[in-house]
Image (cartoon, rainbow, N blue to C red):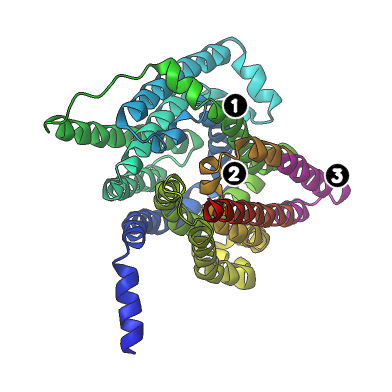
């Protein structure tokens, strides 16, 4: 017993574990707030209205990746702050230009483009799209700076504030006018608020540091960092777009073939199954990324760190997904209302994919550190093709949305398993090379 206590004490005082717990506590609070309000939201708005919001989120999720071309992800990597600050400026400039270009495109041909995508219900909200892109990019830039500074408590507090505003406002507004316009408007405003809070905290940290008597940093040009980290827009940005598109694809295709109610079922299911991924996966990934980068830069062993994080997520994460697989339909009907029982059937299959997606979070963090961006891009191309094939088989051969979701989930699980195996192999090779030097 004494040995167990010593082990637990050692784990709890580990810097990586303590950082994960800080982020996880804020994420848990945010998710708890969300789950508190979601049963009221689902009973108030219904599957069709919820489906329109899901289509908006799916479309903006893909476009938001392009806003800063994934340069914000690189902010954690430079050894010196002056180079990281140049990346911040570069990311914000690109986001402003790209968002303005999207706004112009939507002004000229927005109705036609949105109709061709099969989401005509979003035409009235088209000019919110570039605004969401810009605010999301600003939030990502500021958050990556906070991650670089290991200010995880601030990230956690902002996540809670965002959840209160977003879900609380949606539930309250539904009592007066349960329409899609309110859901989408509140969702967009909450993103803007989160961006402003994160940016304010980042600037506050810089003002505190500026008062210290450090020597002035050597300036770094935007062109220098743009070239030095060009693999992020060349490889990581297309990869993330493909990955996000493959996740958003079921929403757009389900909406085009089966209507917004089916989209509502799918979106609720993904939101619920995203709880373990957000609580555990995102928290571990935010903390693991800079620590893993430090291990590589310091030429320390990486395989034990990567393996421990992956197995830890798998062991902890298997339980909530197993419950969904066994009792999904009944749980959804009881928590969200009888109208949502079908969503529980979707959840039984999507839980398989979500489990492996959770377990691969450390591997995804290791990819930019190992500079596997080009390989990851090819992986995402193959993944997108296989997922499209799975969906089309469900739509055209079986004419059944549930079968389409099942095929999509199985393919996604196998792809995630392969990704984990690849990064573990690369880590093993890296460690062997460090040993021989």
| Along the line of sight, the residue nearer the viewer: 309 or 56 | 309
Query: Eyeballing the image, is 68 above or below 352?
Result: above
Numbered disc in front, either 1 or 2: 1
Residue 175 shows in this picture: no
C-alpha distance separating marks 3 and 1: 35 Å
Horizontal and vertical percent position of residue 169: 35, 43
Residue 189 shows in this picture: yes
Q: Earlier in the sequence, mark 3 or mark 2?
A: 2
- Residue at the image point whose x is 17% and y is 34% from the top: 209
Numbered disc in front, either 3 or 2: 3
The label shown at residue 234 is 1
The label shown at residue 396 is 3
Horizontal and vertical percent position of residue 240: 58, 36
Please identify the dominant SS of the magenta region. Answer: helix
Q: Earlier in the sequence, mark 3 or mark 1?
A: 1
Quickly name the residue at label 2: 48
| Along the line of sight, the residue nearer the viewer: 242 or 228 | 228
- Quarter of the rendering occupied by the N terminus: bottom left
Horizontal and vertical percent position of residue 266: 62, 50
Tell me, yes or no, whether the highlighted magenta stretch contains residue 391: yes
Contact, mark 3 vs mark 1 (Cβ under 8 Å): no
Magenta residues, start to end: 382-409
């Amino acid at each position: 017993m004494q040995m167990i206590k010593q082990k637990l004490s050692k784990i709890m005082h580990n810097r990586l574990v303590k950082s994960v717990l800080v982020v996880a506590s804020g994420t848990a609070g945010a998710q708890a707030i969300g789950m508190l309000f979601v049963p009221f939201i689902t009973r108030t708005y219904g599957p069709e209205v919820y489906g329109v919001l899901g289509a908006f989120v799916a479309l903006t999720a893909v476009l938001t990746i392009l806003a800063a071309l994934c340069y914000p992800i690189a902010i954690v990597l430079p050894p010196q702050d002056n180079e990281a600050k140049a990346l911040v400026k570069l990311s914000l400039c690109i986001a402003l230009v790209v968002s303005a270009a999207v706004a112009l495109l939507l002004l000229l041909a927005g109705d036609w483009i949105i109709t061709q995508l099969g989401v005509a219900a979003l035409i009235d909200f088209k000019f919110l799209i570039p605004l969401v892109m810009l605010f999301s990019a600003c939030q990502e830039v500021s958050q990556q700076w906070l991650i670089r500074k290991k200010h995880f408590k601030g990230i956690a507090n902002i996540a809670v504030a965002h959840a209160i505003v977003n879900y609380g406002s949606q539930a309250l507004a539904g009592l007066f006018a349960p329409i899609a316009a309110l859901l989408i408007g509140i969702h967009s405003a909450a993103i803007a608020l989160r961006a402003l809070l994160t940016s304010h905290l980042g600037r506050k940290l810089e003002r505190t540091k500026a008062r210290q008597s450090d020597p002035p940093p050597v300036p770094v040009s935007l062109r220098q960092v743009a070239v030095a980290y060009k693999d992020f827009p060349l490889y990581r940005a297309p990869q993330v777009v493909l990955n996000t598109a493959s996740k958003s694809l079921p929403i757009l295709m389900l909406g085009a073939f089966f209507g917004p109610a089916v989209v509502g079922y799918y979106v609720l299911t993904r939101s619920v199954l995203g709880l373990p991924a957000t609580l555990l996966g995102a928290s571990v990934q935010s903390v693991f990324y800079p620590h893993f980068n430090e291990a590589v830069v310091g030429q320390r062993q990486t395989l034990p760190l990567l393996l421990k994080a992956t197995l830890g997520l798998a062991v902890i994460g298997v339980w909530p997904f197993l419950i969904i697989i066994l009792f999904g339909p009944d749980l959804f009907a009881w928590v969200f209302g009888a109208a949502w029982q079908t969503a529980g059937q979707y959840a039984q299959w999507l839980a398989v994919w979500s489990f492996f997606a959770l377990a691969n979070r450390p591997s995804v963090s290791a990819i930019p550190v190992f500079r596997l961006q080009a390989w990851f891009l090819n992986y995402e191309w193959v993944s997108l093709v296989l997922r499209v094939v799975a969906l089309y088989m469900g739509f055209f051969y079986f004419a059944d949305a549930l079968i389409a979701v099942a095929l999509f989930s199985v393919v996604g699980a196998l792809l995630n398993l392969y990704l984990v195996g690849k990064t573990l192999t690369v880590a093993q090779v890296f460690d062997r090379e460090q040993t021989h030097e």
